[in-house]
Image (tube, rainbow, N blue to C red):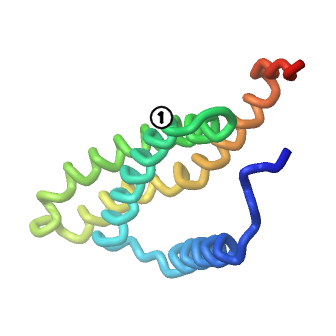
């Protein structure tokens, strides 16, 4: 029985581009309002995509997305709260106030690191404890 994953050059190029973008973003990160607003908005977007993926998939793939959504859900709430509390003050706040707000907002990145790991752990637990399907006779 063949799996759903098939290696292709397209997949290799997309994966390489994603890793390169991640490494470049980490190396060139400076906490500006635009970069932190972007990462918070991406957190909300990816959490929403994970929740939608839970509803559209089944089996081990669904388990992965459930594990990912469990971690990114609270991160999305934190991101929305940060954006709503800081956005009105960006024009009037001093640099020291903005530095404190940016320090708080930069706490979202560990969720990005932990979410896929939690999804993989959920798949591992699913493999250990989920009932095995009965073989057809």
At x 75% / y 61%, what residue is drawn? 6
Viewer-side residue, 135 vs 10: 135
Relative horizontal placement of residue 62, taking residue 50 as reference (left or right): right
Left or right: 9, with 80 as reference point: right
Query: From the viewer's perspective, is residue 88 above or below residue 135?
Result: below
**Callout 1: 10 Å neighbours few (<14), some, many (20+)?**
few
Say if 105 sits above or below 9 in the image: above
Side (left or right) of 60 relative to 106: right
* Callout 1 secondary element: helix
Is residue 15 toward the left or the right of residue 48 in the image? Answer: right
**Foreground residue among 123 and 28:** 123
**On the image, which quarter does residue 73 sit in?**
top left
Q: Residue at x 58, y 46 (%)?
A: 115
> Could you tell me which residue is drawn at 78 percent across and 49 percent down?
3
Give the answer, above or below, for where 75 lies relative to 54: below
Identify which residue is drawn at 44% across, 48% down. Answer: 49
Tag 1 residue: 55
Residue 101 on image: x %, y %: 30, 58
The number of numbered badges drawn on the structure is 1
Q: Of residues 57 and 67, which is closer to you in this image?
A: 57
When asked about the image quadrant of residue 68, the answer is top right
Q: Percent from the top left, x then y, of residue 102?
A: 34, 62
**Residue 64 location, quadrant:** top right
Above or below residue 62? Residue 80 is below
Quick one: quadrant of the N terminus?
A: top right
* Residue 136 location (% of width, % of height): 85, 22
Measured as percent of width and height from the top left, residue 122 is found at 68, 34
Quadrant the C terminus occupies: top right
For the view shown, which residue lies furthest in the front direction? 137
């Amino acid at each position: 029985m063949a799996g759903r994953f098939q290696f292709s050059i397209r997949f290799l190029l997309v994966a390489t581009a994603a890793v390169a973008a991640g490494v470049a973003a980490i190396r060139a990160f400076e906490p500006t309002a635009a970069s932190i607003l972007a990462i918070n908005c991406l957190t909300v977007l990816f959490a929403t995509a994970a929740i939608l993926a839970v509803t559209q998939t089944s089996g081990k793939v669904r388990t992965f997305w459930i594990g990912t959504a469990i971690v990114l859900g609270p991160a999305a709430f934190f991101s929305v709260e940060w954006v709503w509390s800081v956005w009105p003050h960006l024009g009037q706040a001093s640099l020291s106030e903005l530095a404190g707000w940016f320090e708080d907002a930069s706490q979202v990145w560990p969720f990005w690191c932990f979410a896929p790991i939690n999804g993989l752990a959920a798949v591992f637990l699913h493999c250990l404890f989920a009932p095995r399907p009965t073989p057809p006779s």
